[in-house]
Image (spheres, grey):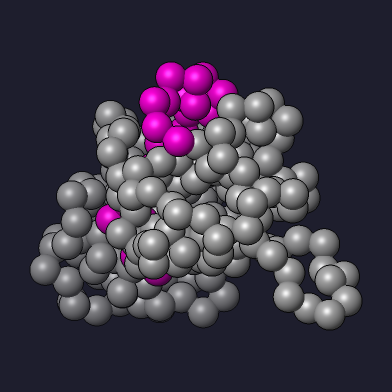
């Protein structure tokens, strides 16, 4: 049975401060919930209109589902999972670092790209949108369950990082002409302002994705699109 305390808790988790306070976040939809159930994430509670999961489930009606879902057309289930404890960030391999990416859809897509290209670690500045934001969770389509994400003071983190630090800039070297390593950090910048001046000072290798259009009028690429191109080129090399 869905109680008032259940509704109050789930509704509160739409806000970052309560997610941090409770160390819980919400996952909606059958596919996404199954991805997390098959991962190392710990289930807190699960609500569904059907008995379709191999986990303890509180059965609810369609009307009750609407009370706890953030979606206009809920997909039969809502689950609450524990936010995992912080892990040490591996220094080997490629790491994506985000410098104040604010759009939930962009972060969700970048998490999916990390999953696709085998990037295990994603490092986010403290001002980057929360990865447990419901819109981010939806956009990852389950990939959040497989990527280690840490929020850090990005300047301090880069100061002690020992491998190459790459960043994308309009005046960087043509990425298609460079020999790219298997280890390093790739910094992607804010949607409106790109990589901040403070982070730029810590970048050791500036890269550029060239424009091929005749007019060359487009000012910049969407950060998630740019991340896809950069990761594809690093992996191809």
Residue 145 visible? The answer is: no
Quadrant of the drawing holding the N terminus: bottom left
Tell me if residue 127 can be seen: yes
At 11% from the left and 68% from the top, the residue drawn is 54
Name which quarter of the figure residue 143 lies in. Answer: bottom left
Up-down relation of residue 135 to residue 183 (above or below): below
Q: For the C terminus, give its image quadrant.
A: bottom left
Residue 158 lies in the magenta-colored region:
yes
| Residue at the spot 48% in from the left edge and 70% down from the top edge | 66
Q: Position of residue 200 (x, y in %)?
A: 66, 33
Instruction: Say whether residue 112 is left or right of residue 134.
Output: left
Q: Position of residue 61 (x, y in %)?
A: 35, 75
Is the residue 4 above or below the residue 116 in the image?
Answer: above
Image mark count: 0
Q: Is residue 189 magenta?
A: no
Q: Is residue 85 above or below residue 27?
A: above
The quarter of the picture where residue 29 lies is bottom left
Look at 68% across and 41% down and name the residue there.
Answer: 195
Q: Which residue is nearer to you in this view: 111 or 229? A: 229
* Highlighted range, magenta: 140-164
Q: Nearer the viewer, residue 35 or 193?
A: 193
Instruction: Find residue 153 and report its horizontal and vertical position in percent.
Output: 53, 24
In percent of width and height, residue 52 lies at 19, 77
Q: Quadrant of residue 50?
A: bottom left
Residue that lies at the very extreme toward the left in this rendered image: 54
The residue lying at 47 percent from left, 64 percent from top is 233
Q: Is residue 195 above or below residue 41?
A: above
């Amino acid at each position: 049975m869905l109680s008032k305390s259940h509704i109050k808790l789930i509704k509160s988790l739409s806000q970052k401060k309560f997610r941090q306070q409770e160390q819980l976040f919400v996952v909606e939809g059958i596919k996404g919930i199954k991805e997390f159930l098959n991962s190392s994430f710990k289930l807190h509670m699960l609500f569904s209109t059907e008995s379709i999961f191999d986990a303890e489930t509180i059965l609810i009606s369609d009307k009750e589902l609407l009370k706890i879902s953030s979606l206009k057309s809920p997909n039969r289930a809502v689950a609450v999972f524990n936010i995992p404890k912080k892990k040490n960030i591996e220094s080997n391999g490629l790491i994506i670092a985000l410098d104040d990416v604010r759009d939930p859809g962009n972060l969700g897509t970048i998490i999916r790209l990390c999953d696709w290209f085998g990037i295990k670690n994603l490092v986010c500045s403290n001002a980057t949108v929360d990865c447990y934001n419901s819109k981010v969770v939806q956009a990852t389509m389950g990939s959040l369950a497989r990527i280690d994400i840490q929020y850090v003071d990005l300047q301090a983190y880069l100061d002690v990082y020992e491998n190459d630090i790459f960043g994308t800039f309009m005046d960087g070297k043509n990425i298609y002409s460079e020999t790219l390593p298997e280890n390093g950090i790739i910094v992607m910048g804010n949607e409106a302002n790109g990589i901040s001046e403070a982070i730029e000072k810590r970048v050791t290798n500036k890269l550029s994705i060239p424009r091929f259009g005749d007019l060359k009028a487009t000012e910049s690429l969407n950060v998630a699109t740019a991340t896809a191109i950069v990761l594809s080129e690093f992996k191809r090399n």
